[in-house]
Image (cartoon, rainbow, N blue to C red):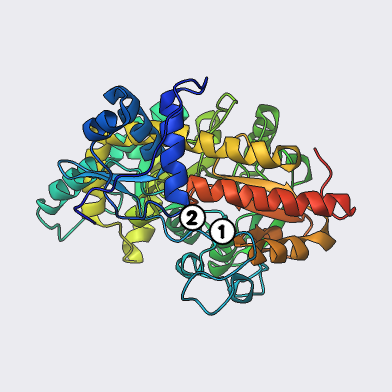
Amino acid sequence: MSRQSTDPPLRLDRSSTVPLTVQLSGGLREAMSGGLLRPGERLPSSRSLAAQLGVSRTVVTEAFQQLYAEGWLDGRHGSGTYVADHGPLPDLSGGAAAPGVSESPAEGRAEGRADEPRLSRARARRLGMVDLRPGVPWVRSHDEAAWRRAWRHAAALPLDDDPDPRGLPRLREELAEHLRRTRGVRVGPENVLVTRGTGNGLDLLAATVLSRDDRAGLEEPGYQRAHDILASRGAEVVPCRVDRDGLVVDELPAGLSVVYTTPAHQYPLGGRLPVPRRERLLAWARERGALVVEDDYDAEFRYDVAPLPALYGMDPERVVLLGTLSKTLSPDLGIGWLVAEPALLERVAGTRTRLSDRTGVQAQAATALLLERGDLDRHLRRMRLEYARRRRTLIEHLGPYLTGDTAGLHVMLPLPAAAVARVVSEAAAEGVLVEDTSRASHGEPTVHGLILGYGAAHPADLRRACRVLAGIVGRSAGDGGGPAPR
């Protein structure tokens, strides 16, 4: 990063009704998005900039705080404030490739259909595209001091040549308390097994409870990786219909021994399974002796709605709860959990030992300290506000068309089947990478549209992408080939 301070050209209008803080943050934002301030350049100190503009230091610090929250600025204690390196911004006017890249975004993209290769996120960034594919959170706003402290603590611990397959006792206690606070689930450490994420937890459970040719129900459309995991363990994976509220319990196929569901925010349609359906699902499971697998992958994030009870808390005997910190903090952390009654949990722990599967002790120790000190809770509160702002951006531009926007980090934009490929292609030509629902379908797609993930995109990029999509969808609707407003 540059050690020299850059003086941005800024003008404030004291006669305007717009607050000075808003004017200043807007001027800096425009300078950064327009290239007058470049990634890595150092801004003047708040004291210096306040003196330069003739305003109070509070005006500057509040503007800086807003831009920190939006991801525009990066800071180091004792070092200064810098323009964040958020990658090249796309030219949305003509679909031109990023400087130095000979391949255009449209030529390099994968349209998102299940039979086509996916363009990697790193390559999408190099091409200057705004990536709105789902599944990735914003990872640039964590408390770096807390993060370093946690890993220094973990690195100082002695290596363990016989780790507990259930996980570090300290972390299991902290996760049990975390679930009580965030999901209203009353469990103890004896109910918690630390995994590397929901996929790892589902695989361990499937290897424990499924026999070859057992029938496992999976939401359709639903999570493709869950389908692959269950099938790899020899199960016959049976599609289970969903609607805008989630799993249609009254239509569950016969002979299922396991049902996998995402009731807090159905993937990909975004529905929240209503309490009456939750009760009917649990009654169905009790009657048939079946096991319900509850994937709670992004339940911490909800907007304008009250939390619904976790299935596990309603019937611990019939439900296994899977969770992860990949959406809360970072996929790189590799920490998740499986919550079950002690007898089943011990069987899963035995499977884990047999498969020589384990979660890194250092990652567990670092996570335990983040939980103990409240660092993770503070990060979660910050990100709820940040994701709520991003969600508002989508609603402002695409609100009449969206569904599933009450929770999580993605929304659904339904489209006529004939329009999907054209919308995806036009978006890519204008520098916006999106994914359609075909990847979430395990047979012939029954639902058509786009799954828009808003967790990982820079706020400025997200606004640009929303304008592009609104224009494309609006034109499609005018031609009779787009979605009808909900």
Left or right: 381, with 211 as reference point? left
Residue 60 seen from this side: yes
Q: Which residue is drawn at 38% across and 43% down?
A: 9
Position in image of residue 349 (x %, y %):
35, 53
Position in image of residue 202 (x %, y %):
49, 55
Q: Mark 2 points at which residue?
A: 202
Secondary structure beneath dot 1 equals helix
Residue 187 seen from this side: no
Quadrant of the image containing the C terminus: top right
What type is the residue that disc 2 sits on? Leu
Q: Residue 6 carries which label?
A: none
The answer to whether mark 2 and mark 1 are in CB contact below 8 A is yes
Left or right: 278, with 70 as reference point? right
Q: Residue at x 33, y 31 (%)?
A: 378
Taking depth in this image into account, of 35 and 403 the one nearest to the observer is 35
Q: Mark 1 points at which residue?
A: 226
Quadrant of the image containing the N terminus: bottom left
- Extreme residue in the bottom direction: 102
Image: 13 above or below 124:
above
Is the residue marked by circle 2 packed among few (<14), some (14-19), or many (20+) residues within 10 Å?
many
Is the residue marked by circle 1 packed among few (<14), some (14-19), or many (20+) residues within 10 Å?
many
What type is the residue that disc 1 sits on? Ala
Position in image of residue 56 (x %, y %):
29, 22
Choose top left, top right, bottom left or bottom right for residue 95. bottom right
- Extreme residue in the right direction: 480
Secondary structure beneath dot 2 equals helix
Image: 291 above or below 420:
above
